Image (cartoon, rainbow, N blue to C red):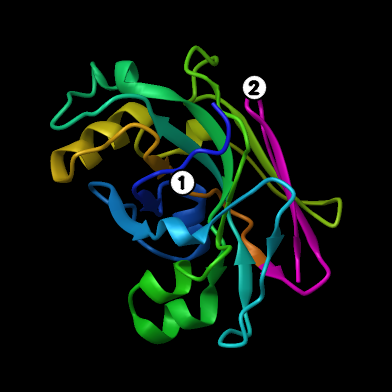
Amino acid sequence: MNRIKPSKIVCVGLNYRQHAREFDMPVPEEPVIFLKPPSALIYDGDEIVYPPLTRELHYEAELGVVIGRTCRNVSTEDARGFIDGYVCANDVTARDLQRKDGQWSRAKSFDTFCPVGRTVAARDTPDPNRLRIRAFLNDRLVQDSNTSDMIFSVEQIVSFVSSVMTLFPQDLILTGTPQGVGPMQKGDRIRIVIEGIGDISNRVV
């Protein structure tokens, strides 16, 4: 499959223990979800546009889960069977707007704020809950963690989201970011690398 075209992009906030500590926030008791519009989607090699409305543009390396078939109210045990595969993703965020608004919609939803891989790694990828995930800003390592630090597993997330909304083929779930998020400037290049999945690289303009 090339260039996924999801009907919706569902994101999980504060899903890494170290990231919650980084922001001095309590570990959630259930997944905290929000949406990005499909118009935010770009692909590996495309440019991230720095909007004039923000002064604090951040990268967030994330594992993306691509849904393979329609699911609603699936159990954690059955969730893996509804996954088509995985992509590297970047939950680009206008951090100052996130603080100002008190909720996340505007800060996460600008055009180009969801870079993902052009191809989907197979669903039989080694355990998605035990993958090294890294981000490099201009070749400098800025995030380095493992999906084993996630509070909620991939299967728990798919089950939880499907209890709220029907998920359709090619829908995308971003599973949260580890510690080390930080600012990007125009001219910067941000690269996300996930063990067994691949990598994406995007320049900020």
Q: Which mark is residue 16?
A: 1
Picture quarter containing residue 20? Answer: bottom left
Picture quarter containing residue 50? Answer: bottom right
Residue 138's place in the image compared with 161, above or below, is below
Q: Does the rendering let one see residue 43?
A: yes
User: Can you tell which of label 2 and label 1 is closer to the viewer?
Assistant: 2
Q: Measuring from the top left, give residue 82's x and y in whole percent.
A: 31, 22
Q: Which mark is residue 191?
A: none
Residue 175's place in the image compared with 98, above or below, is above
Q: Secondary structure beneath disc 2? A: loop
* Lower sequence index among marks 2 and 1: 1
Instruction: Give the side of residue 156 with respect to residue 128, left or right.
Output: left
Give 158 or 142, whichever is nearer the viewer: 158
Q: Does the rendering let one see residue 104?
A: no
Residue 47's place in the image compared with 96, above or below, is above
Where's the C terminus, which quadrant? bottom right
User: Mark 2 and mark 1: span between their CA atoms?
Assistant: 20 Å
Q: Measuring from the top left, give residue 114's x and y in whole percent.
A: 54, 56
Which stretch is magenta? 183-205
Residue at the image position 54 percent from the left and 16 percent from the top = 125
Residue at the image position 38 percent from the left and 31 percent from the top = 154
Q: Measuring from the top left, give residue 117's x and y in whole percent.
A: 62, 39
Residue at the image position 41 percent from the left and 75 percent from the top = 106
Residue 137 forms part of the magenta stretch: no
Amino acid at dot 1 = Tyr
Q: Main secondary structure of the magenta part?
A: strand
Amino acid at dot 2 = Gly
Which residue position holds label 2? Answer: 196
Q: Measuring from the top left, give residue 181's x and y in whole percent.
A: 61, 60
Q: Secondary structure beneath disc 1? A: loop
Residue 35's place in the image compared with 194, above or below, is below
